[in-house]
Amino acid sequence: MNAAVAGTAQAAQPTQWQLDPAHSAAHFSVRHLMISNVRGEFSKVSGSAVLDPSDPTKSTVEVSVDTASIDTREPQRDEHLRSADFFDVANHSTITFRSKKITPAGQERFKVTGDLTIRGVTREVTFDVEGPTPPIKDPWGNVRAGVSAAAKINRKDFGLVWNALTETGGVVVGDQVSITFDAELIKKA
């Protein structure tokens, strides 16, 4: 973790950060018909982090994603994904992640392991994280840093089991889902 993230003479002290929802999103990709990838995003995300530059393993992250904000650029598919066949938005309005363990994985890289909850099912998942970036001061006086994270999950582990067979015996939706998360963090005053 970049020691400059704290940004002051108190660099050794943990600092609190808020996720900037206007500049953050959770993206996903999944195989469709076994021949191509469908990509989408959840545009409404919120969260916070406590970053400890003197011992990054003591940092924490919490993220919440509004499942109704799913967008694959195809309204009919989005409605199906919001239905009980997939995310069941009426009963499970959020996807959450809460970190439990952070381990160094190279220069400015970490493995962040935590509880991912989708559709009321919680599983431990490890994200490969790049960042946080060195902080900058934006034109409005806020201190910001960026972070990117990626993981792969099996959707069936979270109760997302709907599928259909094609004429040739293939499936409509692949099981493995690639997740990426890009966020800007704003340091709390």
Image (spheres, rainbow, N blue to C red):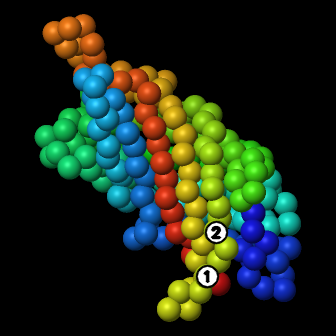
Q: Secondary structure at mark 2?
A: loop
Question: Which amino acid type is shown beneath numbered disc 1?
Answer: Ile
Q: Residues within 10 Å of mark 1 (few under 14, many from 20)?
A: some
Task: Look at the picture and state if 92 lies above or below 145.
Answer: above
The foreground one among 146 and 185 is 146
Where does residue 57 sit, x and y in percent of width and height? 80, 53
| Residue beneath the point at 31% across and 35% down | 37
Residue 136: give its label.
1
Q: Are marks 2 and 1 in contact (CB under 8 Å)?
A: yes
| Residue beneath the point at 44% across and 27% down | 176
Q: Residues within 10 Å of mark 2 (few under 14, many from 20)?
A: some
Q: Is residue 33 visible?
A: yes
Where does residue 19 sit, x and y in percent of width and height? 53, 67
Q: Residue furthest bottom?
A: 140
Q: Is residue 46 visible?
A: no
Residue at label 2? Answer: 133
Question: Which amino acid type is shown beneath numbered disc 2?
Answer: Thr
Where does residue 155 sit, x and y in percent of width and height? 43, 28
For marks 2 and 1, give the CA distance.
Answer: 9 Å
